[in-house]
């Protein structure tokens, strides 16, 4: 197969504030494979290094070192330390070998609220666009302020709204207890679907304890960034929700195999990939994400994709 790639940069319309800092540009790579008959398959490499994938530079070096002719064996032998490359090449390869059948499904999508106080004034835009499940980041500001904002937020959200909180691993055990207590308390006012990644990935045992002590569900995200981590957390007994970011989870066919052979409550989610990656992720989500939960792809309003 003929192989080529190019790099892209998409600026965010407004930088996204997370506890990892401000994120303002999505950089990625598009891989193109062409077989002898002239068929073309494309895939996207969208690294998220603070989640544990390779960096953009490592992905670019990897792409740069490959020869312009590739065999299937080479495409399927990318080392596990390049999960975003595995996804990009795996997507391009399956586009060539097993072209996607277009599905009519239009799943519920979760909309990402701006972090902090801006959620109070901007939630209605998302609601008007049809989002019924909304996600709000916590663990960014001082806890007292955030918890007071949270109370204000649930007071202004429509009653039918479903809210997810995402701490990105930024809480202590005591703070996580505080938040979960608060979530349990307000559950008669609003549906709190889950608290995502309260503690850092190395504290899985503590998160397993938390998941048994409160009524509010917990989801792992950073803990299960790659397929190997997903398998490990499953083996260690995690039975609550798994957030899966297919674009950094390695080869799509391996992820599919894992999800089809293990009964997990999976919520597929975006890493702000561009269109090629997004379409590939949405196809996997339609197949493998829990249909009762909104998928985490309501992020388009954050990117200016023409950039
Ligand atoms: Mg998350």
Image: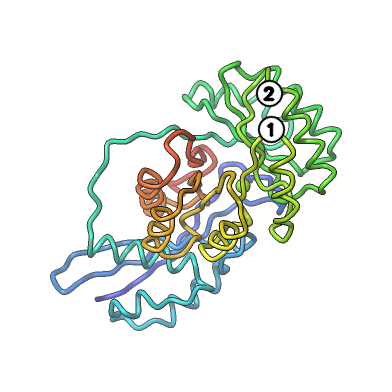
Report x, y in % for residue 33: 28, 69
Query: Which residue is under mark 1?
Result: 215
**Badge 2 density bin: few <14, some 14–19, many ≥20, Cα 10 Å:** few
Q: Give me the C-alpha separation between circle 2 and circle 1.
A: 9 Å
Instruction: Looking at the image, tell me whether mark 2 or mark 1 is earlier in sequence order.
Output: 2
**Label 2 vs label 1, nearer the camera:** 1
Numbered disc 2: secondary structure: loop
Question: Going 72% across and 46% down the picture, which residue do you hit?
Answer: 198
Numbered disc 1: secondary structure: loop
Question: Going 13% across and 70% down the picture, which residue do you hit?
Answer: 37
Image disc number at residue 187: 2
**Badge 1 density bin: few <14, some 14–19, many ≥20, Cα 10 Å:** some
Q: Quadrant of residue 191?
A: top right
Report x, y in % for residue 20: 71, 54
Q: Quadrant of residue 289?
A: top left
Question: Going 20% across and 72% down the picture, which residue do you hit?
Answer: 35
Residue closest to the far left: 37
Q: Would you say 143 lies left or right of 117 here?
A: right
Report x, y in % for residue 228: 54, 66
Q: Are marks 2 and 1 in contact (CB under 8 Å)?
A: yes
Which residue occupies the foreground of this view, 128 or 109? Answer: 109
Instruction: Find out if the beta carbon at label 1 lies less than 8 Å from the nearest ligand 1 atom.
Output: no
Image disc number at residue 41: none
Q: Relative to 227, does residue 215 appear above or below in the rendering?
A: above
Q: Relative to 219, does residue 228 appear above or below in the rendering?
A: below
* The N terminus: image quadrant: bottom left
Which residue occupies the foreground of this view, 148 or 125? Answer: 148
């Amino acid at each position: 197969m003929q192989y080529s790639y190019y790099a892209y940069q998409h600026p965010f319309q407004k930088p996204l504030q997370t506890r990892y800092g401000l994120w303002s540009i999505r950089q990625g790579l598009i891989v193109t494979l062409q077989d002898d008959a002239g068929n073309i398959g494309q895939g996207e490499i969208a690294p998220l290094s603070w989640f544990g994938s390779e960096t953009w530079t490592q992905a670019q070096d990897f792409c740069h070192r490959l020869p312009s002719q590739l065999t299937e064996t080479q495409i399927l032998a990318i080392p596990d330390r390049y999960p975003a490359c595995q996804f990009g090449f795996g997507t391009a390869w399956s586009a060539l070998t097993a072209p996607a059948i277009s599905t009519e499904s239009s799943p519920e999508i979760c909309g990402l609220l701006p972090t902090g106080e801006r959620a109070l004034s901007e939630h209605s835009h998302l609601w008007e666009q049809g989002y019924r499940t909304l996600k709000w980041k916590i663990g960014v500001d001082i806890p007292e302020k955030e918890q007071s904002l949270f109370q204000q937020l649930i007071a202004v959200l429509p009653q039918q709204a479903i809210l997810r909180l995402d701490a990105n691993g930024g809480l202590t055990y005591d703070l996580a207890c505080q938040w979960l207590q608060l979530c349990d308390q307000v559950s008669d006012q609003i549906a709190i679907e889950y608290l995502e990644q309260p503690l850092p990935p190395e504290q899985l045992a503590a998160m397993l304890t938390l998941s048994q002590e409160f009524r509010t569900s917990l989801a792992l995200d950073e803990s299960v960034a790659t397929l190997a981590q997903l398998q490990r957390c499953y083996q260690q007994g995690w039975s609550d929700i798994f957030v899966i970011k297919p674009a950094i989870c390695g080869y799509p066919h391996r992820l599919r195999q894992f999800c089809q052979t293990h009964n997990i409550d999976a919520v597929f989610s975006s890493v702000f990939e561009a269109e090629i990656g997004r379409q590939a992720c949405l196809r996997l989500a339609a197949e493998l994400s829990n249909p009762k939960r909104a998928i985490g792809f309501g992020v388009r309003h954050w990117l200016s994709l023409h950039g």
